[in-house]
Image (spheres, rainbow, N blue to C red):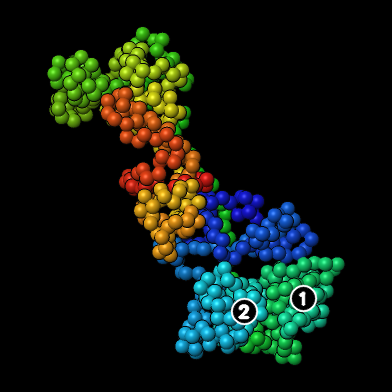
Amino acid sequence: MMVLQNFLAAGTQLRIEGPGKAGVVVPVDTIEPPIVRLKNGSVVRVTLQNLKQIKNMIAKILFLGDILIGFGDFLYNNKPLLPSGFTEEWWREELRAVIKQNFNGSLEKAAAAVKISTLRLEGILSDPFKNKPSAKEAIALSSTFKVPLHPFFTFFWSSISSEEFQTLRKWLLNSERQIEASVVQEITGAKNETIKVLLERICVPHEVVKNKIKIENDEAHIFAFCLGLHAPKTMTVRSKTVFEIMQKLTGIPIRKKAPTFLGARMGRPEKAKRREMRPLVHVLFPVGLAGGSRRNLTEALNKVAIEVDLVKRRCLGCNELTFKTKCPRCDAETVVEKFCPKCGRRLKESFCPICRVPTRSHEKQLVNLKELMDEARRKLNLPIPELVKGVKGLMNETKTAEILEKGILRAKHDLSVFKDGTIRFDVTNAPLTHFKATEIGVPVEKLRQLGYSYDCDGNSLTDSSQVCELKVQDVIIPLKSAEYFVRVANFLDELLGKVYELPPYYNVKRVDDLVGHLVVGLAPHTSVGILGRIVGFTRLNVC
């Protein structure tokens, strides 16, 4: 992500060549990093440690790094599983199997056979990502146990042909070498365009110094070993594959590092922003053309009355006609009244039996907006905002409007309403399985209250750097949405108290107060909500 000049952020959608559709991308720090060519011709494996020094010197990305794709992507899209490169876990399992078979699982005997400490072998087997063997150890493990060479020390040999392999071998045998205690420390050979291209193709880190190519340290030892420096007189057959030739030279199997390369392009950037209608709407109340180009209800107050299409409701108590759900005269519940648009007859059915047309429950009505706004303002004990945006006309079937109190409060809290009456926040969904308290900005005590008593290894949760397994319906939300939810919670509490005369529910003052509260997530193409519980926050624009 950094090598691409921060072009990719967590949650960006990538469209890849098979197996499936676009999907979000998130960083993984254990898989292979990029390999780049610098402006001076040197080839470097990028790490977080060296990135600062080389960031402005990168001329070409030779390899962008590994990508992890779920097996389900292939299964779901009915695509054949593409061959994976040889990985650390795979290598570890083969090593374990040999130790079990040849030494009855005894690590002491296996370590003695390979002349390394038992503790070192234990470390390599427990975490092959953090505890990578050195080049000397990798060769010793492979030579002793006849397991494939460790993936970290496997170059991209499948990218060259047998003839090109012979060209590299010839160059190596003619180059200068520095060898200490049987370990090749440095290889220096003539700079040759063909050799340079081949070294870049198999991604061997090297330096270009004074018209010479220099390979150093572990890479030099492995490179020399794979090309058979220790067996210069061994004859190789050109009809064999590169891997067959290497097995003959080294006596060990070498697996393919990259049998499959995938191309990708950006599909859509990550997203975390409020969902609003265009233009923005505070309240689903029709104002027609009276509110000007901004459909501002405050502007429409200057009119004596405005004519708008609204629902027709009748009070069962005093027979009053209104568009409100409660009768303004006797405070009784009102019911939607259906009528025939042709003959005007009041009906209970959805079809007029005489005119043979569907009944209607809305009509053009004169509304005194100033009176309604004053009533809402008194109830809320708030001044009327300068801007309360309504809609030209209502889209729902019965033309039922929202109460103006909601619009005034939404304007006060800088919220907007969507066409279905909900306040929404759109965010890219990304899978997450584990987290640390430090990463989500929540103290350990609070997590323990939410049921996180143990970390992922079963140890009691006491430290904020321990890794916890995220519970199935818990979510970590973007700070952007958390700040928006604080305003939503305050709007709802004020609405409950001032309009419905009920106690406030959320009592949220700041972002931290949202931890433990429930949220409903809606996927874009379904009409079902998924319940989740907020357990923390992220600066990324993903949920």
* Residue in the image at 43% along x and 28% along y: 413
Which is more toward the observer, 517 or 245? 517
Q: Which x, y percent locates residue 377?
A: 36, 17
Q: In screen coordinates, is 107 left or right of 405?
A: right
Q: Is residue 208 above or below residue 39?
A: below
Q: Check disc 1 and report the residue beneath it.
A: 186
Residue 475 at least partly seen: no
SS assignment at label 1: strand
Residue 213 at least partly seen: yes
* Residue in the image at 42% along x and 63% along y: 459
* Residue in the image at 76% along x and 64% along y: 42
Q: Is residue 409 above or below residue 423?
A: above
SS assignment at label 2: helix
In space, the residues marked 2 and 1 are separated at their CA atoms by 18 Å
Identity, as a three-letter code, of the amino acid under mark 1: Glu
Q: Check disc 2 and report the residue beneath it.
A: 138
